[in-house]
């Protein structure tokens, strides 16, 4: 049997492209070189039919090319040529109103265009069974290929140094303000214990622009955003209880917003970790013992990937997470009547916001249990979300689709 030629069209060169397009197919080529030939192209030759005819499978994330309106026609053309089209999707097509790009999506009708792509794609791959059920309303040919970790990737092998404090951490991007607001008041409740724990805010980034509109003329001008205007400054206020968790001396240092990590042994309670590229960001898990994963309960979050669970698990970190959607797939609450039981996580119901501090205090008082939870989570994820194993599932799927 000749090799199956697969064309992969990533949507970007950042996290989504890495986890959903590039890494899975590089692994596919490496593990099954006799069965597959993979090409990855960020700028496909949209109008060249001979370009497309080289391939038996075209895998794309969300859309083909930058022109959503043309994408539907291209997908239909490929279908008519007998080429298997696989659309991958990892996020719900319409973020909620509080998401930074909600209005942009609506204004450009991108949600409708993504849905149109879903309807005409031959097959769809996605991250979780929860999202698959939602996608099935538009396309019945949907398969779950979860986000997965290559355990040999250097950024997942950084060593955590011992500490006499229990360390909590959050690692993420700039669209999670409303999720992190679930932690409002948490660090105030823990203030009396601040000599026993540390917190690490990872991903800090002050880059960006602000658009200012002249009310009289309507003229729009862009300027660089001031550090104190960024969402990361708001994040920091949550994690420091508006700087009440830190000394005046540390606060003065923090509000200078100098680029780079701010980890000072003289001020161990709060630590700022600067943003890293997608190829090394996960090394930030080395800083802490317990991952915090708050998300609000709405459709966009309910069908998200459980990547935070997977990453924490591969790093053998304990996790305290919202009892919502993706975090209910693999996590089992481990506290009953105040006593630790056989679960692998601590889950917080949205209506019980005080439980964030309650569970953090429980682990501060019982640091060995944090280590045990991390080991249990590792056992949960180490096989199911190993990229080698998920790639085997992908290879089997692709072979069935071209028969």
Image: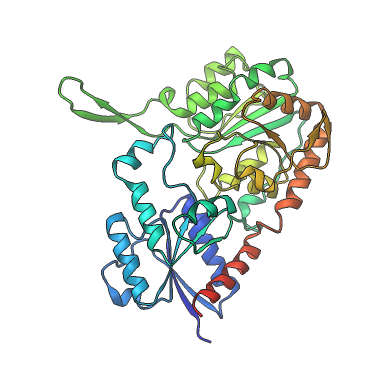
User: Visible in this render: residue 234?
Assistant: yes
Q: Is residue 130 left or right of residue 66?
A: right
User: Visible in this render: residue 67?
Assistant: no
Q: Is residue 308 left or right of residue 14?
A: right
Rendered location of residue 222, percent (x, y): 27, 31
Rendered location of residue 396, percent (x, y): 59, 72
> Where is 347 relative to 352, above or below?
below
Q: Nearer the viewer, residue 62 or 233?
A: 62
Residue 152, located in which quarter of the rendered image?
Answer: bottom right
Q: Is residue 227 left or right of residue 67?
A: right
Q: Is residue 37 left or right of residue 106?
A: right
Question: Which residue is painted at 73% across and 28% down in the image?
Answer: 359
Question: Which residue is painted at 35% across and 56% down in the image?
Answer: 116
- What is the residue that sits farthest to the left in this orientation? 217
Rendered location of residue 156, percent (x, y): 64, 51
Rendered location of residue 293, percent (x, y): 62, 36
Q: Nearer the viewer, residue 246 or 250?
A: 246
> Where is 2 relative to 168, above or below?
below
- What is the residue that sits farthest to the bottom in this orientation? 1
Question: Which residue is painted at 82% across and 29% down in the image?
Answer: 337
Question: Which residue is painted at 29% across and 75% down in the image?
Answer: 49
Q: Nearer the viewer, residue 363 or 255?
A: 363
Identify the image's colour scheme: rainbow, by chain, secondary structure or one colour. Answer: rainbow
């Amino acid at each position: 049997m000749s090799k199956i030629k697969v064309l992969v069209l990533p949507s970007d060169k950042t996290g989504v492209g890495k986890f959903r397009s590039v890494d899975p197919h590089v692994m596919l080529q490496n593990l099954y070189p006799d069965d597959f030939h993979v090409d990855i192209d960020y700028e496909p030759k949209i109008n060249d039919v001979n370009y497309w005819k080289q391939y038996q499978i075209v895998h794309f994330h969300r859309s083909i090319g930058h022109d959503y309106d043309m994408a539907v026609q291209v997908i239909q053309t490929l279908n008519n040529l007998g080429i298997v089209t696989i659309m991958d999707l990892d996020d719900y097509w319409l973020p909620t109103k509080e998401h930074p790009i909600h209005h942009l999506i609506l204004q450009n009708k991108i949600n409708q265009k993504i849905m149109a792509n879903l309807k005409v794609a031959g097959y769809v791959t996605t991250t979780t069974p929860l999202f698959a059920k939602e996608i099935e309303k538009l396309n019945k040919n949907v398969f779950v290929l979860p986000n997965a970790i290559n355990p040999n990737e250097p950024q997942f092998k950084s060593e955590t140094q011992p500490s006499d404090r229990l360390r909590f951490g959050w690692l993420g991007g700039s669209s999670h303000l409303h999720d992190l607001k679930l932690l409002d008041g948490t660090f105030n409740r823990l203030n009396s214990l601040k000599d026993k724990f540390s917190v690490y805010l990872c991903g800090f980034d002050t880059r960006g622009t602000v658009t200012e509109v002249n009310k009289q003329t309507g003229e729009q001008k862009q300027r660089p955003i001031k550090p104190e205007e960024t969402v990361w400054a708001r994040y920091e206020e949550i994690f420091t209880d508006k700087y009440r968790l830190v000394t005046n001396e540390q606060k003065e240092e923090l509000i200078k917003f100098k680029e780079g990590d701010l980890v000072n042994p003289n001020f161990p309670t709060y630590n700022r970790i600067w943003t890293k590229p997608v190829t090394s960001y996960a090394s930030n898990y080395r800083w802490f013992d317990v991952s915090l994963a708050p998300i609000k309960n709405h459709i966009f979050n309910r069908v998200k990937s459980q990547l935070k669970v997977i990453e924490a698990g591969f790093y053998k970190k304990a996790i305290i997470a919202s009892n919502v959607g993706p975090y209910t797939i693999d996590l089992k609450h481990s506290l009953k009547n105040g006593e630790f039981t056989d679960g692998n996580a601590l889950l917080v119901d949205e209506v019980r916001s005080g439980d964030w501090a309650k569970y953090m205090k429980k682990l501060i008082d019982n640091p060995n249990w944090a280590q045990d939870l991390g080991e249990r989570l590792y056992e949960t994820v180490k096989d199911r979300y190993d990229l080698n194993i998920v790639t085997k599932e992908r290879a089997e799927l692709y072979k069935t689709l071209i028969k």
